[in-house]
Amino acid sequence: MSALSIRDLTIAFGRHDPVQVVSGISLDLSPGKIQGLAGESGSGKTVSAMAVLGLLPATAQVGGSIRLGTTELVGLRPRELNRVRGRRIAMVFQDPSASLHPQLTIGAQLTDHVRAHLRLNRRDARQRAIDLLTQVHVPDPAEALRRYPHQFSGGQRQRIAIAVALACDPEVLLADEPTTALDVTVQAGILHLLRELVDQRDLAVLLVTHDLGVMSAVADDVAVMRHGQIVESGSTHDVFTTPQHAYTRTLLESMPDAQQSLVEDDE
Amino acid sequence: MSTVLEATDLAVEYRGHRTVRAVDGVSLTISAGEVLALVGESGCGKSSTARAVIGMEKPHSGDIRFRGAPVPPLGLRRRKAELTAMQMVFQDPNSSLNPRKRVGDQIADGVTAARSRGLSSDAPRQWLGAVGLDPDMVTRYPHQFSGGQRQRIAIARALAAQPDLLVADEPISALDASSQSEVASMMRRLVLQAGAGMLFISHDLSVVRIMADRVAVMYRGRIVESGPTAMVWADPVHPYTKALLGAIPHPDGKGVLPAAPAAEAPAEWHEELPGALDRG
């Protein structure tokens, strides 16, 4: 049983003469699995993730079906969507500074929506916030609650953003380039954390990234997008070791990993 | 090989509530026909080093010599013509190209700089062709190109000045992943064809592996390890270099998580290992 099922999703922008940016993609997210969505900029990966959360602007026309369990999300009224968003589906973005409020303490950001969604009292919400920060390995959680986002490093901020996303125990996590802004050593830590959380909580994750190294490291399955379509999908191992589509092969061959050093060629 | 650039004990400080020493005693040399890559995490001082080397940043202390002569900081006055033999490519082509000027005319500025030093340079059309664009596009404006094409134009303009040294600060980071290594390779080829040297700054170690002769690894304002790229790659000795290389995820489909350091900045990364410098 998939946690989230996307069928024939189409997205077009503009009323007159609409431009189709996603043309009929289908994906299934399963609990405890990371589904990767790879592709270059402009391929439609981010808008597809945004469509799941109903975060597209009003000019977007969304067709097809996105089912969360038995709930159809396409065409859902804003009020009902609000009950799903942040509660059953959460999102982590590339820039943690953009998803955390700069003028609110970490404590406020971790407890306000938990209290709203889960109806917890102040003390229980605070304990829950400390537990969450512990799970994402932020040192000294009780102290961290009193501090502001700018007092943390980029990597710690992304851990906190993940804690905020997980606060209401969502079934589905959408992660759009969650490590792209981070240094490679910090990125490695976040990838470990992501895998750990998926395994512990049986989360279903959609990981959107252009970074094929990151994809290969954590995704169980991968779909490759180009011009609004999925050109290839399968287990990460199969797609990376025996790519079937010419575009996937081109992408992999263009990676520096696949190339000889030019320095040796010179000598 | 003749030395193009020599920086000795370079320090860059930024004053504020608290003075930050962004570059703390960096020495490096670049010879003609050589690509030196400067790698490290964000905030380690790579860009400050590049900006100081070219004179955009006034160093706090230290000595920078280009072809044996000191490099004065950029000021309001025009630079001497000799210093147009140093050219720079920035990360964001949108901020380095003039949006109101045809790209052919901008490349022609580079050609003029070469002529002012008594050198010949190809016509803008040929330079566009050299960086893989259609020569007929000289009459277009920057907004008529994609981000990747704009970066190629910025590279063409810099190379049209026939520099002895090209300083490139994250020139490929804003490009699509599939064109990054192609553009980096192209830069290497064109720079070496011209007999120039290049300081290539990048946080992307995979690209550096294929296109740099030597690599210098920076951490918190200091170079912690340097040497021939292949040697550093195969056998890193400094703990930070080891962590950096170990953290790179490889697109091999094996599903192996890269090694993550136990802490964000272990004490051992600050170690000074004299044996890790100028290896080979």
Image (cartoon, grey):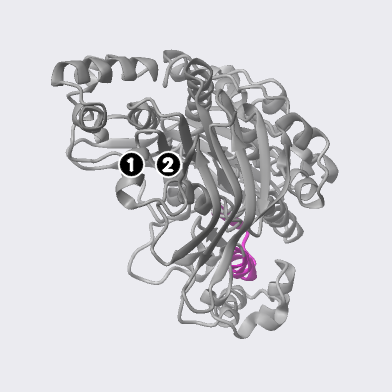
Please provide the residue range marked out in magenta: B149-170
Taking the view exactly as shown, the residue that stands out farthest to the front is A70
Chain letter for mark 1: A
- Percent position (x, y) of residue A105? 19, 31
Residue A64 is one of the magenta-drawn residues: no
- Front-most of residues B262 and A122: A122
- Percent position (x, y) of residue B131? 70, 66
Residue sitting at x 47%, y 66%: B94
Rendered image: mark on residue A99: 1
Q: Secondary structure at mark 1?
A: helix
Q: Reading the chain from its start, which is encountered first: label 1 or label 2?
A: 2
Rendered image: mark on residue B279: none
Relative vertical location of residue B226 with respect to residue B140 in this rendering, above or below: above
Residue sitting at x 72%, y 24%: B234
Q: Secondary structure at mark 2?
A: loop
- Front-most of residues B234 and A33: A33
Q: Which residue is mark 2?
A: A93
Residue A58 appears in view: yes
